Image: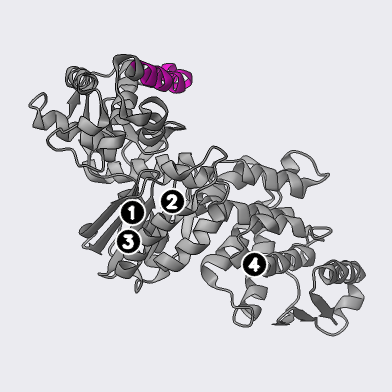
Amino acid sequence: MNSRIPYESYAAVDLGSNSFHMLVANYNDNRLQVIDRLKEMVRLASGLDQNNFLTDESMDKAIKCLERFGQRIRELPRANVRAVGTNTLRKARNGNRLLTRAYAALGHPIEIISGLEEARLIYQGVAHSVYDTKDRRLVIDIGGGSTELILGQGFQPHKMESLYMGCVGVSQNYFNGGEISAKKMRNAILFARQELESIEVNYVKSGWDSVIGSSGSILSIRDVIKALGWSDDGITGDSLAKLKDAVITIGSTDKINFAGLSDDRKPVFAGGVAILCAIFEALQLQRISCSDGALREGLLYDMLGRLQDEDVRDKTINEIAQRYSVDTEQAERIKTTVTRIFDKVEDTWGLAKKPDLRLIQWAAQIHEIGLAVSHAQYHRHGAYLISNSYMPGFSNQDQVKLATLVRVHRRKFPEEELQNIPEHERDRVLRLCILFRLAVLLNRSRFYSSPPKLRLTAKNHDLKLSFPDRWLQDHPLTQADLESEAGYLQEIGFKLVFK
């Protein structure tokens, strides 16, 4: 990182399945200095019913926590704050309802990130905390709803997995009611071993020089083991086995009273122990060290990268374009055109260069990737590829928006595609789609010269395009395309006039 960022505050908010965290830090002299940490045990995962709907009670509890967090960071600029939701919000079928309320409570939007993106950010947080660029490392993070395992070296992850097991879910399913027995513990470990079964051989073959654990469950286990005098440095296989036996002997979550273990952690402690035991068994581990860096720290460093023009999303888009052999000259023509027309309506349509312009510029770069599948319906193929690919740096919501832009960039405007966009963002995304469609249309002939200088004005749902004298008469195909586009836009309540 360089030192172009001024000395000011940045915040990362993690809406985890077990607890909500907020980290506030100053960035100065190429270093992050933590100035505030907030944590509340919300146990959002416990609020999911059997149909994966969050209960009103669990949502109310989450909102009250975010209101307290929001008081601390409400005055920070949007670019200085990143808030993300993980496994439970990925699963929640009514998650958009919570997100709308959460935005108002926190004062900043909440991004939902995929399990692989969560793994990437966790690795970044750990990598920045250990300052070792030579060793190949295995990073393990046991969360409330998922467990991430990452192999990497330096700041670069090479292999990532996010498994659907976490301390909250395992505790609910195997220690429900608080009873802990040898049989229940073994069943919990067997469940975790089954989750690990598909990856363990591949990971062991890859190998590593060091193993690092991060986040609440592992750090709590480390603290208990250290307090009991079973290990002074990290977690060993022997000390973990002793802890497992001790938990079974206690026999109840209500009676767990280890030094170094908070009351909030006790209900899900046995689940975390079971998962870590399974990981030690599956990956044949002898010892792991621990890191205080994790998802929140990774978010901060990722955010600083965006502010310093080191945005991993740019690299992601370039790699996708290369993978699918995109016509880069055509992509660049459309990117240039969409930038020009965006500038003309930015203020009247209430748009912003970040993130709105960047989103449609990215769409321009990869909107033809569906041609790698088939020319017929290539816009549908492209949207599918974007929706179902892991795209480092992108939140689930932005990936949906990007897929929507690609899906609707040609032919009849499928309004139903916008139903996947949260209601409070729908009109803005619709306007971005219209601008993108116009940019693609104006470059449809794939000329090696750019479209003519034109005027575009917009007011509410009315758009007016003005071309140089006789340009449309000399380009009858473009005129026919614009006439078709005017009909498409009329169907969704917009009026396009051109001359």
Real-space Cα separation, disc 1 to disc 3, in angstroms: 11 Å
Amino acid found under the numbered disc labelled 1: Tyr
- Badge 3 or badge 2: first in the primary sequence: 3
**Which residue is labeled 3 in the image?**
11
- Badge 1 or badge 3: first in the primary sequence: 3
Does 51 sit left or right of 457 as displayed?
A: left
Real-space Cα separation, disc 3 to disc 4, in angstroms: 34 Å
Nearer to us: label 2 or label 4? 2
Dot 4 falls on a residue whose secondary structure is helix
- Residue 125 location, x and y as percent? 31, 46
Q: Is residue 190 magenta?
A: yes
Amino acid found under the numbered disc labelled 3: Ala
Nearer to us: label 2 or label 1? 2
| Residue at the image point whose x is 21% and y is 58% from the top | 34
Q: Quadrant of residue 341?
A: bottom right
Classify 418 as above or below 118: below
Residue nearer the viewer, 481 or 322: 481
**Which residue is labeled 4 in the image?**
336
Real-space Cα separation, disc 2 to disc 4, in angstroms: 46 Å
Q: The magenta stretch spans which residues?
A: 186-206
**Which residue is labeled 2 in the image?**
58
